[in-house]
Amino acid sequence: MVLKSFLVSCVLLMFITMAAQPPKKAATQIKILQQSAKPKLVVGIVIDQMRWDYLYRFNQLYGSNGFKRLIGEGFSCDNTLIPYTPTYTAPGHTCIYTGSVPAIHGIVGNSWFDKSSNANVYCTDDSTVSTVGNTSDAGKMSPENMLATTITDELRLSNNFKSKVIGLALKDRGAILPAGHSANAAYWYDDKGGKWISSTYYMKDVPAWVKDFNAKDMVASYMSKDWNTFLPIAQYDLSTPDNEPYENAISGETTVTFPHKLSSITTGKYSSFRTTPFANTFTFDFAKQAIENEKLGSNTVPDFLTVSISSTDYIGHSFGPNSIEAEDTYLRLDKDIADFLSYLDQKMGKGNYLIFLTADHGVAHIPGFLAEHKIPGGTVSDTEIAKEINQAVEAASGIKNIVQSVQNYQVYLNFSEIEKQGKDKAAIVNIVIKTLQQKPSVINVFEINKLMQTVIPEPQKEMMVNGYNPKRSGDIQFTFKPGYFDGGSKGTTHGLWNPYDAHIPLLFFGWNIKPGKTNRETHMTDIAATVAALLQIQMPSGCVGKVITEVTK
């Protein structure tokens, strides 16, 4: 009897234990459901003209909740490079969101020369649409010139357009191209009255909340205060002295020194606002309003907000990367980012939103600054290049104005005129090449369609191949010595293959992102591929990037 009772007790205990445990199949289903969870909101932040080294150069002066938080709690790809030329705003934003290159997505520059219409084309020009939100022509824009889909398009396609996508930036191209073809809205800044506007490509009129935001005239309020340094100016020992002859003044000012008397600017103050750090705060303020009023992140599927911070570019062009203005701008931007992250924490909940932060390009040092320190550098004028080529060709062949355009470090030639006059095309091209080769700043010149047969080092060759679109690119490519670019005696720019233009920051933060860092080479094209992998959706239609697997683990 004792043995029988013991056996009965063992059987009962076994059934109780089995009942207390969920079936293996159910456990598997629970795990799959957890893996399939998506972020409430994806936010892509592009800092226009942010060199990678800014992450660390100003690190000791940053607060703990901005860039430092993104680096410490997120994943940093410290060796991210742009894989094409020219390194400009429009191709940069397009590459980030398409995962593609100009050869495929078609945005070969901020503008290019169209031989079929014999006219210059701006990247987002669209004469078939009209401005909404204001009475200017600044809204005659759309993504029609972009030939590939974006990661934002693919998110919308993945769930039958349930996801809401909104893009915003001071620059039209910084708002329109990232938002994609199927966006619910894109908004950009109009110098006429300092208003956020859009186009009829997206809507018949801007929503009431945008009108209410515009009615506050926050720009006038910002411009009524002067720009003083965030910290005591003596602490800015990572920058050159405040008064340098090679810096450009903010439009409406007569000096390049602090404090910047914004309150004294009356004519063109809404345009001058772009070249102040307050325009970055203004952009984040508008981003918060977009989240609130469009109820982004409260959807049954992920929503996507693209934010491009443009004033860093305007300030960088005018004052250069080694200026107190640039340093001060990034200290203020760090505070703006910290505030935005705090807002998202409260609105979405920590871990419920996904952010990537990157840049569309870097920037070169001002040649005047380099000269002070015996470092090579200089400028060349595209206008002078065109003039010299035209003179050489006319003297040799009689053909006038052979150059249709010089831009994106390429020369567009009027081949139809050569054929019309029965001249030798090869001989004309040879004159152009020889003329450019004589310039001390030029290293190499070649016909772009013969690039593969040209002896030119990597990564230059691959970057130029990726940047060449036969229907939109020029005919002759030229390369400069490091430190040289097309520009004037003051200020600086970007656009070339060199690391100072092509090395960008890349940080992933938030939903499903584990802290870490990689120094292996990654590329701007990898961003869209990685976001697609994280969201488990298709890559964009022209994507050539690869998934950064360290981010997705």
Image (cartoon, rainbow, N blue to C red):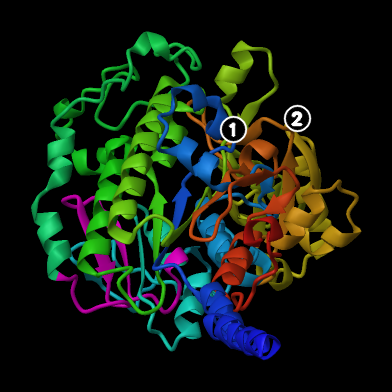
Q: Secondary structure at mark 1?
A: loop
Question: Relative to 530, is 213 on the left or the right?
Answer: left
Asked whether residue 150 appears in the rendered view, the answer is no
Q: Secondary structure at mark 2?
A: loop
Which quadrant of the figure contains the C terminus? bottom right
Mark 2 residue crowding within 10 angstroms, few (<14) / some (14–19) / many (20+): few
* Residue 162 or residue 144, whichever sits in front: 162
Q: Give residue 168's quadrant in the image.
A: bottom left
Which quadrant of the figure contains the N terminus? bottom right
Q: Give residue 278's quadrant in the image.
A: top left
Identify the residue position indicated by label 2 in the image.
440
Q: Considering only vertical position in the picture, is 147 above or below 350? A: below
Distance in Å between CA atoms under marks 2 and 1: 30 Å
Q: Estimate the x, y position of residue 91 in percent, counting from the top left.
A: 56, 58
**Residue positioned 56% across, 18% down in the render:** 369
Magenta range is 178-207
Asked whether residue 384 appears in the rendered view, the answer is yes
Identify the amino acid type marked 2: Pro
Identify the amino acid type marked 1: Asp
* Residue 449 or residue 413, whichever sits in front: 449
Q: Estimate the x, y position of residue 521 in percent, counting from the top left.
A: 75, 48
Q: Estimate the x, y position of residue 358 in percent, counting from the top left.
A: 53, 49
Q: Can you tell which of label 2 and label 1 is closer to the viewer? A: 1
Q: Considering only vertical position in the picture, is 82 above or below 39? A: above
**Residue positioned 91% across, 59% down in the render:** 453
Identify the residue position indicated by label 1 in the image.
53
Name the residue furthest front: 1
Mark with earlier residue (2, 1): 1
Q: Is residue 124 magenta?
A: no
Q: Is residue 191 magenta?
A: yes
**Residue positioned 26% across, 21% down in the render:** 228
